[in-house]
Image (spheres, rainbow, N blue to C red):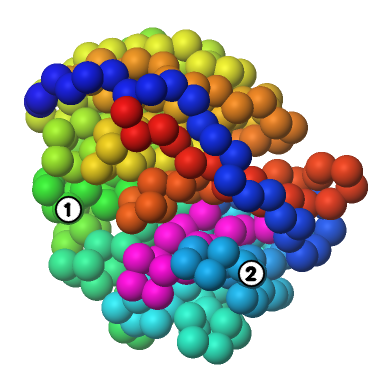
Amino acid sequence: MPVQPQPSPGLTLVAEMVLPGPANRFDYQSIDSTTRRLYMNHMNAGRTIVFDLDAGQVVGEIKDVPRATGVSAVPEHHAVYISAAGAHEVAIADDRTLTISSRVGGIRFPDGIAYALEVDKVFVSDESGGADVVIDAKTRLKRSTIDLGGEAGNTHYDAVSHCIMVAVQTRNQMVAIDPAMERIVARYNLPGCDQPHGFTIDEQDRLAFVSCEGNAALLVLDLRTMIIVDRKKVADDPDVLAWDPAWRRLYVAAESGVLSAWWLNGATLRPIGEIRAPHAHTVAVDPMTHRVYLPLENLRGKPVLRIYAPLAR
């Protein structure tokens, strides 16, 4: 992995705008690079806000998704999958009309969502159900439920290993699932990590970044060896992570109100900035513009989106 000069530290606030809806909690976000849209789950408002990244404005909302947690845009099917945890289901919206076209029920607490293109399946973390639920992206029907043996954290597809990766937070493990066979093929312990929940993957360098909610740790996991190669201290209750592969920047959002920015130097993370804001626990980064999106549930009585620009060098 190349070693590059450390970039200039800091994030510059470039825009702040009031978002629709009540002043309450947000959760996961998803960027659709084909339509240049950002989907932000306004969790306790029961809706998903749709934001045009190029126009810099809200263009609509997907409603009737109680306690919206996880979200994943699947442009191959003009679909947006939303975990409606309050209804124990995954809602599937049409990205052209922003209306719900189908629902998959019987999921105790749906959370993280990942799409495996090669097998055309969607995998959903059932957090309290201790499982990953598999949905056929063509028929939009549940295919199977994979028992994880513990509470499910986030779920991601690794296109290099062709595996679905799941953080199992009550076992302090990372689990690999064969998406074609729909079964667990490996379990990996995460020493020094208490309650791994959020993570993201650097496919090019074969690394995973894992946030540990129980002990406020951030791990760098080598996906070739499944050995932890770096460990950092972060703010309490780290949750959502966002990775910018071109600029090698990692953003970690914590429920305690801190967004930290990191630069990956080889396999080592270097701190390059920090933003403090109430309930700053969800973050997204646009890989085209490198701008960082931080929705906040309550500033002066209203939900607000802050957009930051990192310094290039």
Residue type at mark 1? Ala
Q: Secondary structure at mark 2?
A: strand
Snapshot quadrant of residue 213: top right
Residue 232 percent across, percent down from the top left: 40, 12
Mark 1 surroundings within 10 Å by alpha-carbon count, few (fewer than 14), some (14 through 19), many (20 or more)? few
Residue 74 or residue 15, whichever sits in front:
15
Does dot 1 land on a helix, a strand or a loop? loop
Mark 2 near mark 1, Cβ–Cβ under 8 Å?
no
Instruction: Kindly identify which residue carries mark 1.
Output: 159
Mark 2 neighbour density, 10 Å: few (under 14) some (14–19) many (20 or more): some
| Residue at the image point whose x is 77% and y is 52% from the top | 303
In the image, residue 311 above or below residue 274: below
Q: On the image, numbered disc 2 is attached to which residue?
A: 58
Does residue 41 belong to the magenta stretch? Answer: yes
Magenta span of residues: 29-44
Q: Which is more N-terminal, label 1 or label 2? A: 2
Q: Vertically, is 284 above or below 197?
A: below
x, y percent for residue 70: 53, 55
Residue type at mark 2: give it: Val
Number of callouts: 2
Give how far across and how far down residue 37 sits, in percent: 47, 68
Q: Is residue 309 left or right of residue 256?
A: left
Q: Position of residue 196 (x, y in %)?
A: 44, 28
Q: In which quadrant is the N terminus drawn?
A: top left
Q: Is residue 38 above or below residue 93?
A: above
